[in-house]
Amino acid sequence: MDSLPKSLITELLPKTQDRDRFSKNSVAPQEAKYQIIDPETKRVWGYVCIDNTQRGPGLGGIRMAANIGLNEVNRLARAMTLKNSAACLPYGGGKAGLIANDSSFYNDPKLKSLLIEKFADALFELGNYLPAPDMGTDEYDIQRIYNNHSKKLNKETHDRGGVGRPVECGGIPIDDWGLTAHGLFSAALSLENILENFKLNNSKIVIQGFGNVGCPTAIKLKEKGALIVGASDINGALWHSGGLDIQELSIIRKQPGGLSNYSKPVEKKFDSNKVYWLLEAPCDILIPAARPDAVTAKNIDRIDCRIILQGANTPSNKSVEYYLKHRRNILSLTDFIVNAGGVIGCAVERKMIVDEIYSTIVQEKGTRTYTENLIFDTVAKNIKEIFSRIDEDYIFRDAATDLAMERLETRELWL
């Protein structure tokens, strides 16, 4: 078992030279990268990347995983810059990764809270990074960071300690309210008015990663008549052409063993070593909602769907998406457009902290209703704008990136 560090501190990493030496990047080099270390042992416990703060502090989640590295955090931070910019939020891009190799940090709530507390001490030094929940962390972890900063600032209410906190503490809980899923739902519904011969009713859906994003997305799509034919988590993958029982999946996903406990009939069942096979199952919409790089050159010719909704961050790259469109006629909707629901909720929460008039307006309309409507309208508006820019050679990611970069410079706000 890994021992809990006595303390954690930030250590600024040197800036690396751009490998593209002969052309100018469309986005400026990342502003700062840090590693989080135990000062006694010098062991690295995580990373923080502040990508860009042109629009405001770098907003992005804390990802807690066993094998997260600096490159993954860098890529995710860049995606957050584009995500916040495209959604016209007053934030830049940032991301943190907390390395927890020992399962005890996930299974023992007390041990996890102690690690988060140490991490919060280190994050306090980074005034231009605003943390939020991500894979492996939740609203209660963010509340611990908020409370940690409250003690240091000697303020009960402040705008430094993170967003996406529990509703009983005045926050907007991203996972509990399924806000990221609401953005994916908006994107899927928008396609009914854009694509020929496409309706959600009777569409077959496969969801890789039946967690805090995948599960509520499945529920929302099922309510519109879609059929969830495939689902997976780290324990296993299930496929049934007649549809899976979403109610049972919603219950067992939080139990030990997760989806491996499913009791209803299935036509295909893969163990934890082969969960990625589900990505190749026939469907109308494939939703990768787990780790990066789910769709790659290794499986690109076996993907069997019409649409990919990127529920996870960076589940594929630009080259893969070009191939999908031009060789496979598969439309892939870019992560930083369609899964922006979480950051929009975070932005609403923080503005409610700093703007009393805005807070009153939101509460009068109902905080959850207001937030869900803002997410739905933002994603739908961006989907429509991006499709107006797409041509034969211009893929969705190209148009989405151009849109985000334009708004990065104009600093237009929708909040």
Image (cartoon, grey):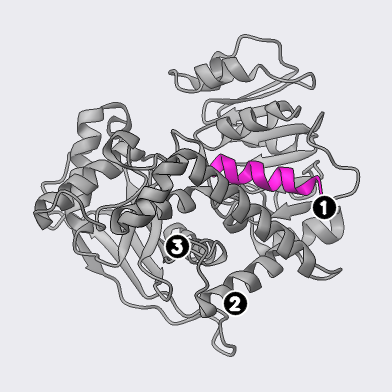
Residue that mark 1 sits on: 194
Residue that mark 3 sits on: 77
Total marks placed: 3
Neighbourhood count class around disc 3 (C-alpha, 10 Å): few under 14, some 14–19, many 20 upward: many
Find residue 163 and report its horizontal and vertical position in percent: 34, 50
Tell me which residue sits at (65%, 73%) in the image.
402
Q: Amino acid at mark 2?
A: Glu
Name the N-terminal-most of marks 1 and 3: 3
Please give left or right for residue 192 compared with residue 378 in the image. Answer: right
Looking at the rendered image, the quarter that the N terminus falls into is top left
Residue that mark 2 sits on: 406
Please give left or right for residue 62 compared with residue 259 in the image. Answer: left
Q: Main secondary structure of the magenta part?
A: helix
- What is the number of the mark on residue 158? none
Residue at disc 1, secondary structure: loop
Let me know if residue 69 appears in the view. Answer: no
Name the quadrant containing residue 115.
top left
Tell me which residue sits at (53%, 61%) in the image.
83
Tell me which residue sits at (68%, 32%) in the image.
221
Neighbourhood count class around disc 1 (C-alpha, 10 Å): few under 14, some 14–19, many 20 upward: few
What is the C-alpha distance between the residues marked 1 and 2?
Answer: 23 Å
Residues marked 2 and 3 touching at CB (< 8 Å): no
Find residue 197 and report its horizontal and vertical position in percent: 91, 43
